[in-house]
Amino acid sequence: MTQTVYVAEGLYSLALLACPVGMGLMMWMMMRGKKQPDQSQEGPGPSQTDAELTRLRAELDQLRSEARDRSAPPGRPSGSS
């Protein structure tokens, strides 16, 4: 009977320690991976960002124009106030 109790206590202790030990191992592995800089994570340069911003502004203007055209009454031109 006492041997069964020791085995049960050992398994319980092992299960209890598995979570923090596993968490620590995962944190260590993630931190170890960050030491090597990845060129793809740096992001676009300033000229790429400016070009993307210009493209998105043009797309926004086009969408606003289309929305204005859809909401305008049929007999009235969309450019007049």
Image (spheres, rainbow, N blue to C red):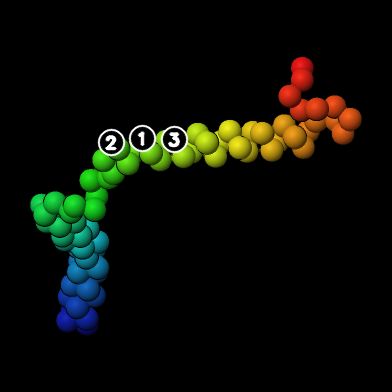
Q: Tag 3: residue type?
A: Thr
Alpha carbon distance from label 1 to label 2: 6 Å
Mark identifier at residue 64: none
Question: In this view of the protein, which residue sits in the foreground, 18 or 35?
Answer: 35
Disc 2: which residue: 46
Disc 3: which residue: 54
Q: Tag 2: residue type?
A: Pro
Alpha carbon distance from label 1 to label 3: 6 Å
* Percent coordinates x, y for residue 25 in the rendering: 16, 61
What quarter of the picture does the N terminus occupy?
bottom left
Which element type, helix, strand or loop, lies under badge 3?
Answer: helix
Q: Are marks 1 and 2 in contact (CB under 8 Å)?
A: yes
Neighbour class for label 2 at 10 Å: few (<14), some, many (≥20)? few
Which element type, helix, strand or loop, lies under badge 1?
Answer: helix
Which element type, helix, strand or loop, lies under badge 2?
Answer: helix
- Report if residue 20 is visible in the image: no
